Image (spheres, rainbow, N blue to C red):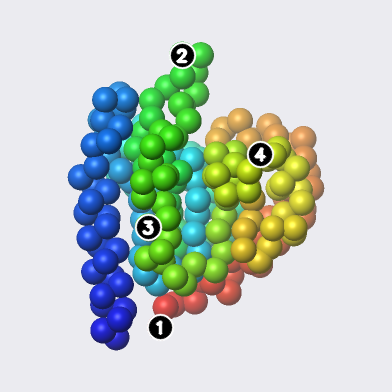
Amino acid sequence: MTGQNEAADDLASLVAQIRACRVCADNLPLGPRPVLHVSTTARLLIASQAPGTRVHETGISFNDASGDRLRGWLGMDRETFYDSSRIAILPMGLCYPGRLPKGGDRPPRPECAPLWRARLLACMPDITLTLLVGSYAQAAVLGPGRVEDRVRDFRAYLPRYFPLPHPSWRTGAWERRTPWFAAEVLPALRAAISPLLAEPK
């Protein structure tokens, strides 16, 4: 138990450092507000892109329409999704990066993941499966490649990773064009995460 307490203290100290981070402040249009949900007992990790404006406002990851879509894919209610004792949510960029001139959010700030990600993962030793949600998470972990190809070939990345598209509003049209996603990928996704959701000991 002492070891668990020390690990939790280490993680809490690290999160406090992250909350105080100002490295990218001059490049963040709404200012720094790191958003993450982590614990030393989580077994499932959702690796995503970066917060949007709604997430920045509320400080809650996927607290928007994309979150509703993702929870639908997972077959998961909000209470379970936000139970950080079982599920960690860690975007590649922890703060809202702003908008591109032609629309859409900017990529995650490149400074963020190298500063914090490995240190956070080291504090979460029970992570068994990581959902790589969207192109930025997949590129960071798997290198260059097409999201659709990886999603369709998801079995090649199990049991450690499960690639998924970003659940933006644009994905609705993509899903209609790719019926194999609902027929093949989603049942396998739910089967993969189910054993990881048991209450922590």
Residue count near mark 3 (Cα–Cα under 10 Å), binned few <14, some 14–19, many ≥20: few
For mark 1, give the secondary structure. loop
Q: Earlier in the sequence, mark 4 or mark 1?
A: 4
For mark 2, give the secondary structure. loop
Asked whether disc 4 touches disc 2, contact meaning CB atoms under 8 Å apart, the reply is: no
Q: Which residue is mark 4?
A: 144
Residue 118, x across and y down, in percent: 42, 55
Q: Between residues 48 and 53, which one lies in front from this camera angle?
A: 48
Q: Which mark is residue 166?
A: none
Q: Which residue is mark 3?
A: 119
Q: Amino acid at mark 2?
A: Pro
Residue at the image point whose x is 29% and y is 63% from the top:
11
Q: Which residue is mark 1?
A: 201
Q: Is residue 54 visible?
A: no
In the picture as drawn, the residue positioned furthest to the front comes out as 114
Residue at the image point whose x is 51% and y is 14% from the top:
102
Q: Earlier in the sequence, mark 2 or mark 1?
A: 2
Q: Earlier in the sequence, mark 3 or mark 1?
A: 3
Q: Which mark is residue 101?
A: 2
Residue 137, x across and y down, in percent: 54, 44
Q: Between residues 97 and 166, which one lies in front from this camera angle?
A: 97
